Image: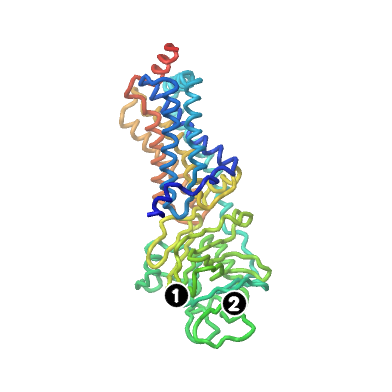
Amino acid sequence: MASFLSSFALNGWRKGLDDVLGIFLNILLFIPFGFGLAEKLRERGKSRSATLIAVYAAGALLSYFVELLQFYIPSRDSGWGDVITNSFGAFTGAWIFEAAGARIIAWFSALEQELDSSLSIPTIGVIVALYTGLWCLLAAPLQKQVRITNWVRDSFLAVGDHASLYPAPPWQGRMLELDIWNRSLSSQLARRLTAQQPTEAGASDALAVYKFSGPAPFHDLEHFLPDLDWASQTPRTADGALFDGRSWLISAGGAPMLVSSVEGSGQFALRLICQPAKTSHTDATIVSVSSPSGTINMELGQYGSSLAFWFRNRLSTRRSRMGWNVPQVFATNQTRNVLISFNGSVLSLYVDGREYSKHYELGPGVALARYVRRLKTEELEGYEFILYAMIFIPVGCLLVFAWRKSDVGWIERSSFLLAGLLLPAVALEWVVASVAGRTMSPGEICFSVLLALAGCAWMNADRGSSGAFRRAQELVSAR
């Protein structure tokens, strides 16, 4: 009961108050909410003081419930700092409306009317094509920044630690199997493999397969990578790969072919079946592709009961916070079948036949966000959403003007609207998928189309009423 009640207190006061840019963004996020709510309340005859108080309270309440929901999401953090900054943002939006709201609405409404009358369908088509074309040109170099292009070739495959001459305390537990691919795996295949369900012959097509039974050295059944043998000073004679915290396995030679193969495809998948000996006070590497100098290309580790994964690319090399920590994956003396799959832009995790709901996304939005703020792993999906909203909501706003042309038949307008929704979405997805080396995603295309439709709906929100321009003029006259 006490634990349940403590969630309503969130996680203290520090979150959101030690990051100047975060404070600014939190305030900015709620300014439109406060502006719009104030406009609606004033339309209903509420006084200025009542409007300001109501908007501030509504902003605080909305932000609090968002933070409360984040309390139950393992990858998110909640705190009163965001509630304070968000509610102040709503209050700021209401204050802006009181100070200049009527003039702002009148100006935008007049601009909308001017565009409505002056833009022809061919002109709208040219603007949409140029706008989305520019974003496609920008998306290609941005996506290249997250490709796997800088792995160190003099690397070794290590199990239970990394290949450094000065390794950390080795992992403790039992390793049963290790598989490596130079491509991503489909969600269906990954779930079947981690559930140890039968698959079609050749369906997995792994690059390397190690089964840890019998005495060392352990051979790659695909004959692609070198044997794995114990790196401890005292040779191990136990059957299988049992890690006691004093030794680990390392490949008999370097693995430059693995590095070249992964860099060439820009994709990889890693599967291991393991049984940790403990979860408390544990911070150890389970599998790594690393060099004796200490440079790490890829590392999957255990941090308590959490899975920690990091791999090298142009963004993560300079940002240690770009690791992916997934809570509550491991349990003491419990066997886990884990698979990590990266398709060039999205990293997915599968454990015992189930796909982890949250993905690790590395798209053009992440590469663009690094120029304006310090990247955080828990915000990666948000960066992509913001970028796609910046691209496709304006597209939807422009397409509305074409739909309003009453001098053109509805068939022509419908065809133009459909093309305007689909073609930019398909073009951007083709560019991103081509650079990432993955197949095009229908889900990404649908997401882009939905954002464009949101732009259409937003531009047309006041068409059924008296219109924003008339209301703004009435407000100006009343003052």
Q: Is residue 190 above or below residue 92?
A: below
Q: Does dot 1 land on a helix, a strand or a loop? A: loop
Residue 418 coordinates in the image, percent (x, y): 36, 37
Query: Would you say residue 118 is visible in this rendering?
Result: no
Residue 457 coordinates in the image, percent (x, y): 37, 32
Of pointers 1 and 2, the one earlier in the residue sequence: 2
Query: Would you say residue 367 is visible in this rendering?
Result: yes
Location of the N terminus by quadrant is bottom left
Between the C-alphas of marks 1 and 2, the distance is 23 Å
Residue 38 coordinates in the image, percent (x, y): 42, 26
Q: Is residue 369 above or below residue 256?
A: above
The amino acid type of the residue labelled 2 equals Ile
Q: Does dot 2 land on a helix, a strand or a loop? A: strand
- Mark 1 neighbour class, 10 Å CA radius: few under 14, some 14 to 19, many 20 or more: some
Q: Which residue shows up at 42% across the image and 14% down it? A: 473
The amino acid type of the residue labelled 1 equals Asn
Q: Is residue 277 above or below residue 259?
A: below
Would you name the residue on which mark 1 appears? 333
* Nearer the observer, 377 or 268: 377
Relative to 369, 58 lies left or right: left
Colour basis: rainbow
Would you name the residue on which mark 2 appears? 250
* Nearer the observer, 165 or 260: 165
